[in-house]
Image: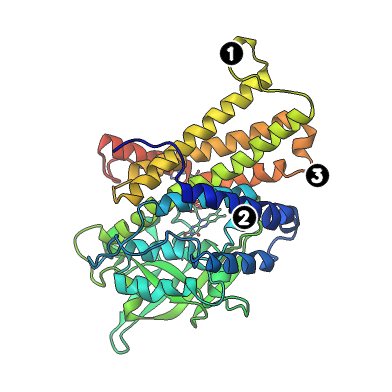
Amino acid sequence: MPIEFEAPKPIVQMQFVLKTVAEEMMRAHSRYFDEHEHEIPWDYIEFMHTAMKAMGVGSLAPNEKGNGQGSDGQKERRPSIAYQVLASQIEMLSWGDVGMYLVTPGGGLGAAAVQAAGTSEQKAKFLARFSEEKPTLGAMCMTEAGAGSDNSAIRTRAVLDETTNEWVLNGEKIFVTSGDKSFNEYEQLGRGFIVVWATIDPSARRAGMRAFVIEAGTPGVKVTKLEHKLGIRVSDTAAISLVDARVPYDHILGSPTVEKSTSGFKGAMATFDATRPLVAASGLGVARAALEFLKEKLTENGVQIRYGLPRQKLTSIERDVIDMEIMLKSAWLMVVKAVWMADNKKSNALEASMSKVKAGDVCTKITQKVVEILGPLGYSREFLAEKWFRDAKITDIYEGTGQINRLVVARQILGYSGSELR
Ligand SMILES: Cc1cc2nc3c(=O)[nH]c(=O)nc-3n(C[C@H](O)[C@H](O)[C@H](O)COP(=O)(O)OP(=O)(O)OC[C@H]3O[C@@H](n4cnc5c(N)ncnc54)[C@H](O)[C@@H]3O)c2cc1C
């Protein structure tokens, strides 16, 4: 198969459109929503929903038309560049504003978990809503106090009530992206859901972990807190409590019984294999925004980057800019490889984690360097450089911190299991 470094035509065309969206609908409002944390950007949400529907894509998710497989083995087909397209969309929207990108209507991590661990029937049932009349969001609740990096330590418990054939869930989840908009019912939004990871057998540890789809408004479930954050402040990050929350039997993703395997946990890992390159893409969008802004300011001040000169003849700023461009492009290539593998149904656990490690480093380094080179202009709230610096760090934290993804990479390369290398 020939190696092609040109972006496919659909991506180039789509980027042109999304750049306008990013400039007009996102950048123009970045500062306002940064300073008014927890206000909801309804105009953006409405606009994106209408625009995506007009383009025939119901939401920001790989455009499933069926050649994948449900967890029940049913065939589905998917265009071969669906994840590549999605990564490019996310990079461009995050170039606009990464916090607002996280508020884009769509299933988010919740839908990704259904994609990764659901049967084809469950996918049809739960994912259709993201293409319907109203903008709708989904979220995934894995993290608990004491169970973040080691998510096999989750204590949220799901017990089957055999008299009603319902699952009963109890526990406390924290740091749920879009937890509020996915669970609480807003007039402007369709009915979303949260996917909650719980254990059906605490003694089985990873083998006992299962995900449950919980519809918005389910009694017993409550958003108890919205975090105040360093960056991505327009994106809600919720704490959610579950007290005797009743969930229909068939809302469990995966097998309702515990086998002597880690299949439950594999559902969680498959979710992250799909989403980590996308998180990487979002971080690189922020880094590109910062780097382009720096170059604009340098040009305004008569500083040209003299590409092609021997390194010792370049100024320190020129070297810094060129080094940042190298970091950005090489990190992007890792994202492209990871999503290409996902599109081609190749196991990409190694590449997904590698791309996220690299992007986490690159976007924190680039945004920091841009603030540094710009000096007071970088630190001032007059410009967005200081905001991008704050926004970038999350890339290195959620969906596996830099340290945890380095462990995943090391295990994959050295052939160790999770218990052998931690
Ligand atoms: C804004 C935001 C949004 C989020 N959204 C979601 C979401 O939608 N859903 C969800 O479920 N979670 C979400 N999270 C949670 C996020 O995934 C966790 O914060 C992250 O996985 C780290 O877990 P922790 O907070 O428990 O930190 P800890 O696991 O306590 O880690 C603390 C530090 O120790 C390091 N560390 C831990 N174990 C090791 C080890 N074995 N080796 C080396 N270093 C180690 C970590 O890298 C980190 O630096 C979100 C978090 C934030 C901040």
Identify the mark at residue 378; answer none if there is no mark: none
Where does the image place residue 43, in percent across and percent down from the top left?
68, 67
- Report the colour scheme: rainbow
Q: Is mark 2 within 8 Å of ligand 1?
A: no
**From mark 1 to mark 2, how far is it between C-alphas?**
37 Å
Q: Is residue 195 above or below residue 376?
A: below
**From mark 3 to mark 2, how far is it between C-alphas?**
19 Å
Q: Residue furthest left?
A: 260
Residue type at mark 1: give it: Arg
> Mark 1 — residue?
311
Identify the mark at residue 382; answer none if there is no mark: 3
Q: Secondary structure at mark 2?
A: helix
Q: Quadrant of residue 165?
A: bottom left
Quadrant housing the C terminus: top left
Q: Is mark 1 within 8 Å of ligand 1?
A: no
- Residue 400 in view, yes or no: no
Could you tell me if the residues under marks 3 and 2 are in contact, i.e. CB atoms within 8 Å?
A: no
Where does the image place residue 123, in percent across and percent down from the top left?
36, 70
Could you tell me if the residues under marks 1 and 3 are in contact, i.e. CB atoms within 8 Å?
A: no
Could you tell me if the residues under marks 1 and 2 are in contact, i.e. CB atoms within 8 Å?
A: no
First along the sequence among labels 1 and 3 = 1
Q: Quadrant of residue 419?
A: top left
First along the sequence among labels 1 and 2 = 2
